[in-house]
Amino acid sequence: MERKVRVRFAPSPTGPLHIGGVRTALYNYIFARQNGGDMILRIEDTDSQRFVPGAEEYINRSLAWLGIGIDEGVKEGGKYGPYKQSERRDIYREHVKMLLDNGKAYIAFDTPEELEAARKEIPNFQYDATTRGRMRNSLTMPKDEVEKRIADGEKYVVRFKIEPGRDVRVDDLVRGEVVINSSILDDKVLYKSADDLPTYHLANIVDDHLMEVSHVIRGEEWLPSAPLHVLLYEAFGWKDTMPQFVHLPLLLKPVGNGKLSKRDGDKLGFPVFPLDWKDPKTGELSSGFKERGYLPEAVVNFLALLGWNPGDDTEVMDIDTLIRKFSFEHCSKAGSKFDYKKALWFNHEYLMSKPDDELAEMVMPLLEDKGWTGYSREYVAKAVGMVKGRANLVGDLLEQADFFFVAPTEYAEKDVRKRWSEDMPRIMEELIGVLEGIEDMSSANAEKIVLDWIASKGYHLGNVMNAFRLAVVGACRGPHMFDITELMPKDEVIRRIHKAIVTIK
């Protein structure tokens, strides 16, 4: 019978969730939903020294904001729990004992100083079949001595015993068959008595097996550990339940070579985390996509196309379309450049597709933060609807529409020099009289009346209209002038023209 698709996203709570990790979570989620499977969130907190307070909560909030639903996890529960590795110590001890009893692993007492001495003595030293015989471990010591050392509380590790000279085959859905000879692998540490916790390698294999994970979808950086994981599955006798491996391409710097890092975002001015993150130790604040004004669906769309394509020219795809079209056959083996300008493009497209009242809901809190209150949601919706074509981020909506909510206190110097001639105050006084006589301030009606007046007076159309805009907006920018005056109360328009007449010199 075909196995049910069960995937897991397994981050470590050692800091904020990097956008590369978000993409891994997204691909797991899309694949699970496409196949009617389950999405597991497992917290890998076995590295107790690197644990960062608040990181686990941050992971959950980030995934929730992006709409990456979790079926089983610390919060959601499930029959395969606990879903936090620090709560699974008994399970790991049991499996360490299984490997020791079957001769697949051994106990090593080498101190850090002894290991460092071996590295200096032996070129390219690694703990393996060629060197383990000269080290302090249960393969070179009598059994009673090993037992006494453990009973005396001496710290030790458990290492996996890798037999050399064997080709290990890893079947990968993106990279095909990868073959590594076991002679180049070292006897990895699987367990440390110092904190009574397993290392990544053992915990992952045991948890993936017990949680019946069918596909391990993770970043390319984990590919070197895949042969070891294959050998561990075999050592436990689980070869028939081994998951299908998928190693995703790296996310690369926008400029230069190498893996995308926080420094790239700091240097070029884009976020690399989904949400704002404040380092609990240093207090340093790193900005997130959400707080920068990105929409979650735009971020999802952007990330999905970093390393995958739908096989056609389609770019804008909602989550349902991504789920329908996704295939590992169209994943790239090569790393994918993180084009942050493309992220802005996606966000612009999604802003444009949003109904104006939804945009107004996003902008209302920004208005409150500035103290620009008293505006109806309908008014805000019409205002942002006029300017959204010029916006890439949510904050841009308010920046482009600010004049709808607050009168200008300054006037663009360049526009003043170009548009405000000596006789413009007199002409603006005349314009006020024209506007006061208009009962129907709808855009088309007001435009006809004002343009007819300009023509009848023989005034220069561009000069008058730009001065009109300068007085109301504060600069020669913004949407169609008579769309502005249709929305803005007429007395406010007139008040602004009066102010400009007095203020602009």
Image: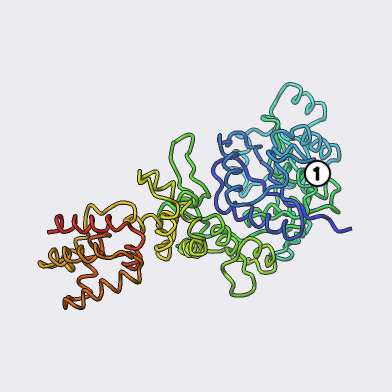
Q: Is residue 148 above or below residue 358?
A: above
The quadrant of the rendering that contains the C terminus is bottom left
What residue did someone put label 1 on?
Answer: 210
349 or 27: nearer the eye?
349
15 or 317: nearer the eye?
317
Q: Is residue 407 above or below residue 198?
A: below
The quadrant of the rendering that contains the N terminus is bottom right
Q: Residue at x 57, y 67 (%)?
A: 316
- What secondary structure is found at the residue carrying circle 1? helix
Among the 4 quarters of the image, the one containing residue 476 = bottom left
What's under tag 1, amino acid-wise? Leu
99 or 112: nearer the eye?
99
Instruction: Say left or right for 310 vs 257.
Output: right
Say whether residue 241 is visible.
Answer: yes
Instruction: Say left or right for 299 vs 408.
Output: right
Farthest left residue in view: 422
Q: How far across and how far down the image is residue 434, in percent?
A: 22, 66
Q: Residue at x 60, y 65 (%)?
A: 317
Q: Residues within 10 Å of mark 1 (few under 14, many from 20)?
A: few
Instruction: Say left or right for 229 vs 491.
Output: right
Q: How far across and how far down the image is residue 496, in percent?
A: 23, 56
Instruction: Say left or right for 385 vs 80.
Output: left
